[in-house]
Image (cartoon, rainbow, N blue to C red):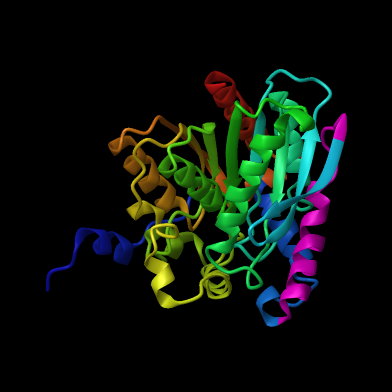
Amino acid sequence: MHIAPEFKAAMHGTHPAPLDPKVRAFVRGMAADAGKFPRRDTVSIAEGRDIAEKVRAPWAKGGPAMARTQNLPVPTRHGEVQIRVYTPAERRQPGAFIYIHGGGYVLFSNDTHDRLMREYAQRAGMVVVGINYTRAPEARFPQPIEECIDTVRWLRANGAALGFDAGQLFIGGDSAGGNLALNTCLHFRDAGEAVFRGMVLNYTGFSTNLYRDSVVRYGAGDYGLSLHMMVWFFRNYLRRFDDFHDPRMNLLAADLHGIAPAYLAITECDPLYDDNIDMVAKMQAEGVDVASKVYKGTVHSFLEAVSIAPVADEAFDDTVRWMANKA
């Protein structure tokens, strides 16, 4: 019987990589707090979101203080979305970094990612704008993409009033937020508008393919993000089976020629690891100016462990150096 080489590798298996000790403490702390509540997919969406906010809250505390933080409504074709504008005390870059939080399109918010965005603002000396897009299942694919596109258009028109140069924008996000960021960038490329100096894609979901070695190796739930949760996220976000194959979901099949430069922060112990490695290769093959780094011993969402994990510090500093070079 002939067996394809990639399936031979999966059948033989590979030992998971060792976790960074501080990241291990983050995983255990998060798991202990989550264990105080019912599993999020077994309760209502509202209850699941509330649990997620409570579990994430300790990791969003502390960190840099901002000179000003504003919560503002932004009109989109689907109604208002909320943005949060972080202005650091020391400005070294005149533009803004638009950041889109992850959470499988279903969970999390600007609150869960508050410290993460303040870290970027302080370290880069740049305004950071978080987008609270409408989450699934209230807003199914592709509504969150369209909300992000409309929010970027509004920010370009209103940047001066918010205190930043709208001609020097970066966009980024983590996990599902990285998917929304890349889709937003692709939209403006297709419209012939050079909007972004660069994209920051943190442990992003680039496809709907769950039959991957890294999903098998790291998707059982011991490393945070699980295969079961990924299926639950897709079930809430996508409207129909055909959406699984839409190039806006399966970005590894999208045309990436001519997009803005990209930096990929890749987590080693992550079900999405293979997607990220393949995306770097695809970008290189299609002529994208791409830089990437695999952060050893890290898990999905490790940037939120910045209060205890030096490897998260390293990733923030790597990213802001890259942005400074692209400004």
Residue shown at the point (44%, 42%) measured from the top left: 191
Name above or below for residue 233 compared with residue 301: below
* Count of picture labels: 0
Based on the picture, tell me whether residue 55 belongs to the magenta stretch. Answer: yes
Q: Is residue 20 visible?
A: no
In this rendering, the answer to whether 213 lies above or below 258 is: below
Question: In the rendered image, which quarter is residue 118 located in?
Answer: top right
**Which residues are the magenta region?**
43-68
Majority secondary structure of magenta residues: helix
x and y, in percent, of residue 110 in the image: 75, 51
Query: Residue 210 location in percent, x, y?
Result: 42, 66
**Image check: 82 left or right of 153?**
right
- Closest to the observer, 208 or 71: 71
Which quadrant of the figure has residue 126? top right
In magenta stretch: residue 64: yes
- Judge from the rendering whether residue 81 lies leftward or rightward of residue 253; answer left or right: right
Image quadrant of residue 120? top right
Q: Tell me residue 182's x, y (percent).
A: 49, 46
> Which quadrant: the C terminus?
top right
